[in-house]
Image (cartoon, helix red, strand yellow):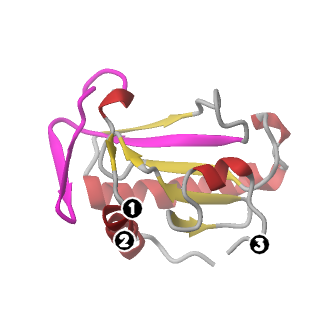
């Protein structure tokens, strides 16, 4: 794991919410689940503008997004996937990743509808997980994650 992480990564529950870590990126469970498997894809650098990331981070992004999408397909059987770079409050480069689907998806005792389907994600409808739910869902996603390294 990283010895030093930026404040945006810390805000989203690192290290408890960590699902996978790469050289330039970290994938975290989003504590407020808009849809089942909502994630944070965060750059590990201190960059606050997307083009300020090093070229190697852009190259690695292909593998990270492939891993995200294969895992979320297995876990949430999404129809679409949204990567939203909202960076309004949390300044470091990061995306909110939402698998999108009609109806609800279930895992580990959670049932989470996509309240915004088929339009934009309904951020206000997010289910805030408690510590036990967070750890259970992190474990579930890790069990489906491709090997990193």
Residue interval drawn in magenta: 93-121
The C terminus, quarter of image: bottom right
Q: Residue at x 67, y 58 (%)?
A: 25
Q: Residue at x 64, y 31 (%)?
A: 89
Q: Nearer the viewer, residue 128 or 120?
A: 128
Q: Is residue 94 magenta?
A: yes
> Tag 3: Cα neighbours inside 10 Å, few (<14), some, or many (≥20)?
few
Quick check: 72 left or right of 59? left
- Disc 2: which residue: 144
Front disc: 1 or 3: 3
Badges 2 and 1: C-beta atoms under 8 Å apart? yes
Badges 3 and 2: C-beta atoms under 8 Å apart? no
- Image coordinates of residue 57 in percent, x first then y, are 75, 53
Above/below status of 103 relative to 120: below
Q: Residue at x 38, y 69 (%)?
A: 135
> Tag 2: Cα neighbours inside 10 Å, few (<14), some, or many (≥20)?
some
The N terminus, quarter of image: bottom right
Badges 1 and 3: C-beta atoms under 8 Å apart? no
User: At numbered mark 3, what does the secondary structure look like: helix, strand or loop?
Assistant: loop
Q: Residue most toward the front?
A: 130
The circle on residue 71 is 1
Q: CA distance from mark 1 to mark 3?
A: 26 Å
Looking at marks 1 and 3 on the same chain, the residue that comes earlier in the sequence is marked by 3
User: At numbered mark 2, what does the secondary structure look like: helix, strand or loop?
Assistant: helix
The circle on residue 3 is 3
- Image coordinates of residue 33 in percent, x first then y, are 35, 45
Q: CA distance from mark 2 to mark 1?
A: 6 Å
């Amino acid at each position: 794991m990283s010895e030093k992480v930026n404040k945006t990564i810390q805000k989203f529950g690192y290290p408890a919410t960590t699902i996978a870590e790469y050289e330039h990126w970290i994938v975290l469970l989003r504590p407020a689940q808009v849809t089942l498997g909502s994630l944070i894809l965060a750059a590990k650098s201190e960059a606050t503008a997307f083009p300020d990331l090093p070229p190697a981070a852009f190259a690695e992004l292909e593998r990270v997004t492939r891993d995200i999408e294969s895992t979320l397909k297995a876990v949430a059987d999404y129809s679409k996937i949204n990567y939203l770079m909202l960076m309004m409050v949390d300044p470091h480069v990061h995306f909110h990743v939402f698998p999108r689907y009609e109806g609800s998806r279930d895992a580990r005792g959670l049932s989470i509808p996509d309240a915004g389907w088929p339009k934009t994600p309904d951020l206000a409808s997010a289910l805030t997980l408690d510590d036990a739910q967070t750890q259970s869902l992190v474990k579930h996603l890790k069990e489906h994650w491709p090997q990193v390294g």
